[in-house]
Image (cartoon, rainbow, N blue to C red):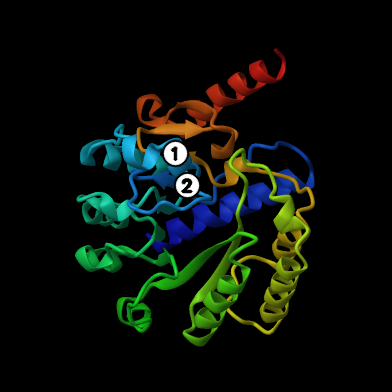
Amino acid sequence: MLKELSFRMVWNYLYNFFAVTFRRTGNLKPLFFVLYTNLRCHFQCSYCGFFQRGDTKNYTDDLNTEDMIKLLRIIRKDATAIYFTGGEPLFRKDIVEILKAAKEMGFSSITINTNMHLIDRRMEVLDYLTNLVASYDMSDNPTLQKEKGFSMTVNCVVTPQTIPQARKVLNFCLGHEIKFAVVPAELEDGQINQELQNSPEYQELINDLIKAKKKKKRIFGSTAFLKKIRTFERFDCYPTLTPHIYPNGDLFYPCQPLDTVAANLLKIGNYAKALQIGNKRAWTIANV
């Protein structure tokens, strides 16, 4: 099993390397799938597009347990890594059953992104994870990482007003051997926040992350990535590296921020076919 999983990941990586190097195609092999289990959430984060649209309260088109597991089987044919997100995934009463199914299918990397406020009711999820991505708002003992055998990352969305708080989160992570990931908040329409882009305080924060990275501290992302988000310079985008799937099975293409759907992956039953439909739709839209 481990050999097969390693081969899939290595094959996709090598395919992508040569595809990018020789410009053969922009449709790269997925390294992992991002699956929105649901959009419901009890938080009201100002930077969250789902909250702004009312989806965290009103979206109800979630797949049931059986169909969600069917969807995982389809995904598993093309990747060995899965990233569960929301909304708040722990709102699903069947989340443990879904994670357990993913582990039994042989996903080598199982990640969940959670705000941690329901973790005390869903502690069993930790038995099926390889990675936990969490909000800072938590009081759990960080030693659970070692006990349960998963790696923990704190995801910190930064706005112009929260840069000092982001530093406190960073210091907490460095002191507890937790990986720190910074995400610059976008505006409601997905555009760059000019106030953040022009903030010397923000640039200083990213510079400090680059320094910490060079000292082998647990900072998420490459140095090149950190430099990109420091200046917000343009970069080549390869959305098929991390395909995003909605709670109803819709596959986004090219990407979720554009809110354009290729096809319903559960109904099509095959990622390559769904992507093919998405490519045709994207070409049509671009040439109207």
Snapshot quadrant of residue 226:
bottom right
- Which amino acid lies under the numbered mark 2 shown in the image of this protein? Phe
Query: Residue, x 36% and y 30% (percent of image)?
Result: 266
**Mark 2 falls on what kind of element?**
strand
Query: Residue, x 43% and y 65% (percent of image)?
Result: 135
**Dot label at residue 185:** none
For mark 2, what is the residue? 33
**Dot label at residue 245:** 1
Residues tagged 1 and 2 counted as in contact (Cβ below 8 A):
yes
Query: Residue, x 40% and y 70% (percent of image)?
Result: 137
Q: Left or right of 6: which side holds 214?
A: right
- Which amino acid lies under the numbered mark 1 shown in the image of this protein? Ile
- Closest to the observer, 36 or 183: 183
Res. 165 visible in picture = yes
| Residue 169 in picture, x, y percent from top left | 52, 75
Up/down of 139 relative to 124, above or below: below
Q: Left or right of 81: which side holds 69?
A: left
**Residue that extends furthest to the front in the rendered view of this protein:** 161
Q: Earlier in the sequence, mark 1 or mark 2?
A: 2
| Residue 288 in picture, x, y percent from top left | 70, 12
Up/down of 195 relative to 256, above or below: below
**Mark 1 falls on what kind of element?**
strand
- Closest to the observer, 5 or 114: 114
Instruction: Please state which of the two labelled residues, at mark 1 or mark 2, is closer to the viewer.
Output: 1
| Label 1 crowd bin: few (<14), some (14–19), many (20+), radius 10 Å | many
Image quadrant where one finds the N terminus: bottom left
| Label 2 crowd bin: few (<14), some (14–19), many (20+), radius 10 Å | many
| Residue 235 in picture, x, y percent from top left | 76, 48
Res. 77 visible in picture = no
| Residue 125 in picture, x, y percent from top left | 27, 63
